[in-house]
Image: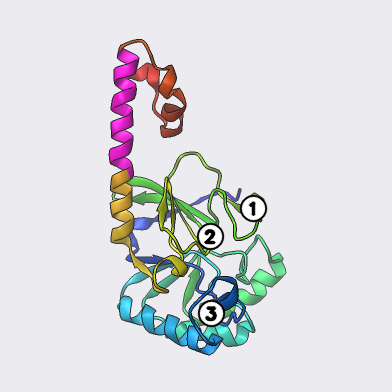
Amino acid sequence: MPEPATFDFDEVDFITSDTHFGHARIIELAARPFASVEEMDAELIRRWNETVGPDAVVLHLGDLALGPIAESLPLTAQLHGRRLLVPGNHDRVSPATQTKRAVERFAPLYDEAGWRVLPEVIVGTRAGQSIMASHYPYSGDTQGDDRHVAHRPVDLGLPLLHGHTHDRENGPLGHQFHVGVDAFGFAPIPMTLVDAWLEDLRREEEEIAAIVRDRSAAGDSSPLSEVAKRLGVDLGAL
C-alpha cells in the first residue's frame, strides 16, 4: 500500500470517479446507455456542468480519460470547478500502472487540462470524522481477481471512498462508498451524501460501542470482540 497522504476532505464539494472520457469500449463493458463515445463524452460534460458550479471543488477518484490521451484529456478542461485527481489504474499518472518516466511525461497534460494530481491514497477528516479515499476499494474488482493489490489501501476499519468497480447498484456498502458515475447518473455527487453516510456509520459505531460496554460490564465481551476490534474499541477501557 502506498503511504497515505494527508488531505482536507472538508474542502471538497463534490466527488466522482471513472468517467473514462474517450473510452469507447467502456460503453459496452459497463453497459452505459450511449450510442457512441462522442455522445458519452458530451453527456458527461453536460451533466457535470449542470451539477457543479464554477467555484466548487471536485475530487475525482481516478480513471478520468482513456483512448488517445492527447484528445480525451483536453475535453476535461471544459468541466466546471477546481478539480483534484486521485489516479486510477487507467490514468497516465498512475504509479500502479505507469513508469516514473511516463508519469513525468504525462503530468503536464493533466496540469494543462486543469487537474491537480494527488497521491494514490489520501486520508484525513470530514467534519471531524476520519476518512480515506482511493481509486481502489479494499477489495473487489470488475474482474474475478483483485488487481493492483500493492496499490490498494489496507482495511483498518476507516470509511473508504472509492471507484474502480463500475458498480451500478449502490453507493455505500458497509464502510466503503463507491462514488463512480455508473452508480450516480453519470455525474458527480454532492459531499452531503457522504456526510449522511458518515453520520450513519457514526451512529452505528456508537450503538455497537454501547453494547460492547454493557457486555464488558457484565463480564461477557467475547461475542462482540471482533466487532470491537474492527471499530477500534478497547474493551478493557470500557
Q: Is residue 37 above or below residue 84?
A: below
204 magenta-colored: yes
As measured in the structure, the alpha-carbon distance from the residue carrying label 1 to the one carrying label 3 is: 23 Å
As measured in the structure, the alpha-carbon distance from the residue carrying label 2 to the one carrying label 3 is: 16 Å
Q: Is residue 187 visible?
A: yes
The residue at which mark 2 appears reads as: 135
Amino acid under disc 3? Phe
Q: Which residues are magenta?
A: 201-217
- Give the SS element for disc 3: loop
- Residue found 53% across the figure and 66% down from its top: 62
- Give the SS element for disc 1: loop
- Looking at the image, do the residues carrying marks 2 and 3 touch, with CB atoms under 8 Å apart? no
Q: How packed is label 2: few (under 14 Cα within 10 Å), some, or many (20 or more)?
A: many
Disc number placed over residue 21 in the picture, else none: 3
Q: Is residue 54 visible?
A: no
Q: Earlier in the sequence, mark 2 or mark 1?
A: 2
Q: Nearer the viewer, residue 103 or 159?
A: 159
**Quadrant of the frame with the C terminus:** top left
